[in-house]
Image (spheres, helix red, strand yellow):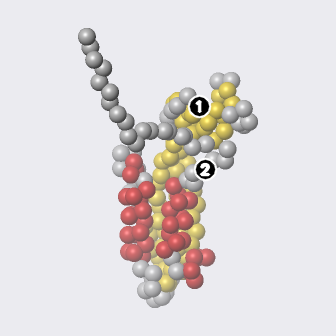
Amino acid sequence: MEYLNKMQYHKLTDYLISVLPKAYQNNFYSWIDSAEMLNEGRNVTVDYIELMHLQYDTTFYFEDLPFRQIKPVEIMAHIQTWLYENDPERYQLELANPQCTIELIDDKVATVEFSISFQEKITAQESENGDLTLNGKKYQLGNVEIYYAKEFEIIPKRIE
């Protein structure tokens, strides 16, 4: 099983690329600056474990941004709305607010850099083919599959 979910910063990168003009997309970069592995692991289901929480800081870098055509405040708004919809736990985790620096190059372009922190759960599934070993069991990175009922019926039991 391939680790299915992209990391949050990959998803935000994909989103930002989708809203940028095609002619500018090659001037946009993102990367992880630093990461901390938090020992928050636990059993999630019979077959899945949470190995850790990964807290990391990222940079979203816009080189030679033509700020009169692509306004930094619009990028800020895209980032903020994406975070609201896709990373709702960030406020409970008390992650730092995104930071932005703008350096004017001339009267047409600027370098715009965002620093954003994320925290994600890293999970694994028990697997004979896994390359991770924990407590004598083999695991591979994978998404937790949790099944839930969309509907259910309560049948009262008669007590006599």
Q: Percent from the top left, x then y, of residue 10?
A: 56, 59
Q: Sort mark 2 into few (<14), some (14-19) or many (20+) by Cα contacts within 10 Å.
A: few
Q: Percent from the top left, x then y, of residue 64?
A: 54, 80
Image quarter of the C terminus: top left
Disc 2/disc 1 C-alpha distance (Å): 16 Å
Q: Percent from the top left, x then y, of residue 82?
A: 42, 62
Where, by quadrant of the figure, is residue 1 drawn? Answer: top right
- Residue at 61 percent across and 42 percent down: it is 142
- Residue at 49 percent across and 74 percent down: it is 19
Along the viewing direction, whichever of 42 and 60 lies nearer the viewer = 42
Amino acid type indicated by mark 1: Asp
Instruction: Determine whether, in the image, residue 128 is placed left or right of residue 9.
Output: right
Along the viewing direction, whichever of 26 and 49 lies nearer the viewer = 49
Q: Secondary structure at mark 1?
A: loop
The residue indicated by pointer 1 is: 47
Q: Sort mark 1 into few (<14), some (14-19) or many (20+) by Cα contacts within 10 Å.
A: few
Amino acid type indicated by mark 2: Leu
Q: Exactly how many numbered labels are in the figure?
A: 2
Q: Is residue 38 visible in this depiction of the protein?
A: no
Tag 1 or tag 2, which sits nearer the N-term? 2
Instruction: Determine whether, in the image, residue 80 is placed left or right of residue 147.
Output: left
- Residue at 54 percent across and 40 percent down: it is 144
- Residue at 50 percent across and 39 percent down: it is 146
Q: Is residue 31 above or below residue 155?
A: below
Along the viewing direction, whichever of 61 and 101 lies nearer the viewer = 61
Q: Residue furthest bottom?
A: 107
Q: Is residue 56 visible in this depiction of the protein?
A: yes
Where, by quadrant of the figure, is residue 155 drawn? Answer: top left
Q: Is residue 22 above or below residue 79?
A: below
The residue indicated by pointer 2 is: 4
Q: Is residue 135 above or below residue 94?
A: above
